């Protein structure tokens, strides 16, 4: 019998994307799945629409916006209590290949040392362009990055499973034993860096993190998705520091982060080409201050 896989789809006012994601999950060739839709207090009727259209989907309404961490944690605990062998975190703005879950589970079943896997993720609007083929951490400079970002897929990262530092929470499959051993996502992050920190915990607990290229999916995110907005920049800045602290990053990482922040502030202040980024200087300084004073979780960013 196949292992039981709980698929968690988190929604916050993304009804159209969520319904499309659930439609793609209808075509999975993996038979032993249960789907949990977590709604973070949306106002667009997603929960009602899912109950009506997909009565077999478990709908959990949090009553508040708990972020990526809190919303997923509610469902992770539910899945563990209800016998899941594997738990898949899946962004609601994704479309999956019918066999992508079969491929990842098969890889994990063949090697019990693999605790976490992630698929090849392409851009939905550029379906042969890579968004991520796993992630890497540069401890010397205190940076993290997506492998293959914006590259055309010509099998440059191999065809077989490959060990990586982390996989994106956009599609993260993990054994129940990993969740039980290292715990759930850290709510201090709210969103961004949480899956990277969790993967570091998994690695340090003795599990391998593996990218599986034959498992494929498409993410509805733009090629310029990492363009800076105040809210995203705030969480990316604060949580990068929190990630460094939680993972006990060394002095070189801290020096690299400090140097980068200083160069960025100087460049935004002096170089005309970056004048549109000048309003973000205050966001950076606030993020650093909030980290220093322990203001974590959700924050209002204007």
Image (cartoon, helix red, strand yellow):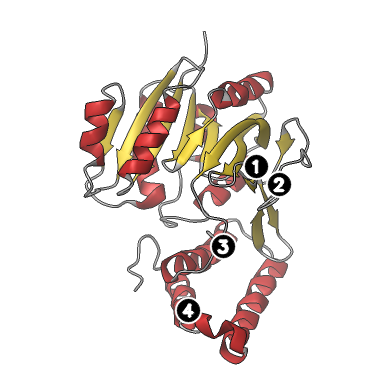
60 versus 146 height, above or below: above
N-terminal label among 2 and 4: 2
What kind of element bears circle 1? loop
Which residue in the structure is indicated by mark 2? 152
Residue mark closest to the camera, 1 vs 3: 1
CB under 8 Å between discs 1 and 3: no
Residue mark closest to the camera, 2 vs 3: 2
Find the distance from the CA under tag 4 to the CA under tag 1.
33 Å
Q: Which residue is drawn at 79% across and 42% down?
A: 156
N-terminal label among 2 and 3: 2
Which residue in the structure is indicated by mark 4? 280
N-terminal label among 4 and 3: 3
What kind of element bears circle 2? loop
CB under 8 Å between discs 4 and 3: no
Which residue in the structure is indicated by mark 1? 128
The part of the image, by quadrant, that contains residue 209 is top right
N-terminal label among 4 and 1: 1
CB under 8 Å between discs 4 and 1: no
Find the distance from the CA under tag 4 to the CA under tag 3.
23 Å
Find the distance from the CA under tag 2 to the CA under tag 4.
32 Å
């Amino acid at each position: 019998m196949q292992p039981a896989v709980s698929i968690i789809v988190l929604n916050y006012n993304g009804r159209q994307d969520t319904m499309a994601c659930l439609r793609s999950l209808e075509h999975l060739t993996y038979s032993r799945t249960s789907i949990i839709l977590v709604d973070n207090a949306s106002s667009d009727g997603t929960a009602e629409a899912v109950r009506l259209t997909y009565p077999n989907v478990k709908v959990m309404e949090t009553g508040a916006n708990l972020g990526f961490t809190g919303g997923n944690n509610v469902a992770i605990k539910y899945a563990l209590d209800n016998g899941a062998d594997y738990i898949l975190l899946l962004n609601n703005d994704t479309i999956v290949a019918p066999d992508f879950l079969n491929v990842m589970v098969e890889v994990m079943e063949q090697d019990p040392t693999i605790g976490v896997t992630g698929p090849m993720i392409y851009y939905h609007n550029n379906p042969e362009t890579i968004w991520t083929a796993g992630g890497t951490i540069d401890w010397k400079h205190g940076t993290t990055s997506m492998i293959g970002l914006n590259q055309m897929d010509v099998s440059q990262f191999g065809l077989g499973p490959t060990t990586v530092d982390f996989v994106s929470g956009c599609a993260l499959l993990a054994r129940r034993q990993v969740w039980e051993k290292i715990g759930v996502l850290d709510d201090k992050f709210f969103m961004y860096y949480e899956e990277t920190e969790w993967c570091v915990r998994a690695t340090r607990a003795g599990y391998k993190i593996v990218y599986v290229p034959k498992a494929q999916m498409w993410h509805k995110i733009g090629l310029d998705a990492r363009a800076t907005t105040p809210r995203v920049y705030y969480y990316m800045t604060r949580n990068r520091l929190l990630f460094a602290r939680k993972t006990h990053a060394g002095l070189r990482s801290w020096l690299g982060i400090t140097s980068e922040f200083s160069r960025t502030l100087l460049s935004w202040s002096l170089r005309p080409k970056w004048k549109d980024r000048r309003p973000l200087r205050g966001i950076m300084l606030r993020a650093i201050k909030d980290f220093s004073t322990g203001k974590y979780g959700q924050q209002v960013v204007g």
